Image (cartoon, coloured by chain):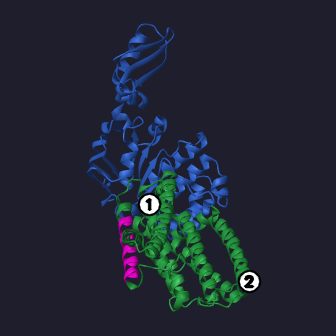
Amino acid sequence: MSSVAAIVEYGFREAVRRKVFAVVVLLTAIFLVLFWLANHFVFGQLSNITPPRDVNVDTRTFAGAFLTGLAMFATLFLGVVLAVFLTLGVVSGDAERGLLQPLVVRPVGRSTLLLSRFLGAAGVCVAYVLVVYVAAMVITGLTGHWWPDTLVWPGVELAGGVVIVIALSLLGSIVLSSTANGIAVFMLFGGGLVAGLLASIGHALNSHAIKHASTIAAWALPFEALYQDALRMMTAHTSGLTGFLLQLGPFGGAYVHGWTIRAWAAAYLVAVGAVALLAFARRNL
Amino acid sequence: MSTALAVRGLAKRYGSVEALKGVDLEVGEGELVGLLGPNGAGKSTLVKIAVGLVRPSDGEVEIAGARAGSKAARAALGYLAELFRFPGWYTADEVLELHQRLAGSNGGAAERRRLLELVALADAAGRRVDGMSKGMQQRLGVAQALVGEPRVLLLDEPTSALDPVGRRTVRLLLEELRGRGVSVLLNSHLLSEIELVCDRVAILLGGELVAAGTPAELSRPRGIELETDEGVRRIAGAVREDAPRLVAEAVAAGRRVYGVRVLTSTLEDVYLEAVGEEMTD
């Protein structure tokens, strides 16, 4: 346990030293201030929004769900930024700089080293995502007097999505240089988001081909599916036209959801971890 | 003498390049063996396989009886890489503490203080790595390799960045370690250093072992130099046993003899002879 703690601490100090936390905290503070301003103005002017009489839309729910959906996206994005910068150079980057070799030859071993780096990054990112998520919900709740239908699970799923990105980034760091790995993970992340938007478009247009493509993408990149499921749960009990409009997206719908995708995400995480451990064990340094 | 490091039929291929072609080498307990060879000879590859950083294509390496790369082998060795770096934001003391935790050493602050004294860094315990000179970092690297009192030490160019005083510090340290029964495989380009401290020398060329033995075994007679009132005369082909006769003959011939020196090839001569063909290619 001492060696695991030593490596976790090593990764943490590296992140502090490289100002990863400073950048993320600054970005987060800017986001939360802007988010509070958005809530302040949107809910302040809510009484001025009058939908037609025959359109039965709950404007407060609509505004609240839309704003928290936006916060979910920002939280996921910032969480992924933190995850990628904590892990993009763990193997290849550190090996190129000569930082890794003195650690790997110690009895602690490669698998413990990689798992410890994963645990360190996951601990930091999960805590970060949950704090930002709760802060955003509290801002909307206190400013607009609107709370999501489900509060805990969306945060857990959002954190789970970031943990999957950490595993992918660690796997990438074994076979790619730091720069290439950072680009690859961000492209995967972007690809997942595009797939999510495609799903909304596919369902709006009732296009079987687009829906099929987005479903495959959601299973291939389950962090996106978890994010979509988290969005869905925010307004899971909202019915009528308001619920229908929110489900159209982009901050409400999920077309791959439920326990099947959650179980798949867990299995996916284990599989990526196993491949990473195997690849690291065979990697010449 | 039992074997601390055993290399048997070791081969390594990187694609079409054969870095090692069936190398056999042994380092006994308490023995200090120097590994020599030009760039690309396979020295670092051999060391990296021995510490488990690189997988061999064929053959095997054992450290203290355990397969190279296994936990038992890693627990028995100390390693200084040719190209290494410690995090710049760690102090010298923190670097050693990190390695103590990874090595499972319970030597505590006393071990860290002793190691820093051994490499003449006692006054720099609290200094951060990014504030150290390259030579200081290399000495810290040597101290790091000694954390946990390893039985086998593999040092890849440990003095390349050191000044003469630093080299002497490391040389004295290696001699002390040998006295304590620690086995050392020293990979270095500095022939004079190897000649001064090593019990045996192995020369690699193109991935093959081309010469091995003690410096005395590897050296060859190169004649006798006789200094008389006529000047210095070199008698090629003469050996140590000829010296008394040559002195007697000179005295009998009325010469005054001021000195006699038996000439043998230096390690540099041996090395250049072994790798010379490749170097002139």
Q: Amino acid at mark 1?
A: Gly
Badge 1: chain ID: A
Which of the 4 quarters of the picture holds residue B74? bottom left
Q: Is residue B33 visible?
A: no
Whether residue A46 sits left or right of residue B171 in the image: it is right
Mark 2 nearby-residue class (10 Å; few <14, some 14–19, many ≥20): few
* Residue B253 in picture, x, y percent from top left: 42, 7
Q: Residue at position x 68%, y 91% from top?
A: A145
Q: Mark 2 or mark 1: name the one nearer the start of the chain.
A: 2
Magenta segment range? A260-277
Whether residue A33 sits left or right of residue B5 in the image: it is right
Classify A66 as above or below A169.
below
Viewer-nearest residue: A271 or A48: A48
Q: Residue under label 2, please give it.
A: A45
The answer to whether the residues at label 2 and label 1 have Cβ atoms under 8 Å apart is no
Q: Is residue A195 visible?
A: yes
Chain A shade: green
Q: Residue under label 1, please give it.
A: A172
Q: Give the SS element for disc 1.
A: helix
* Residue A141 in picture, x, y percent from top left: 66, 88
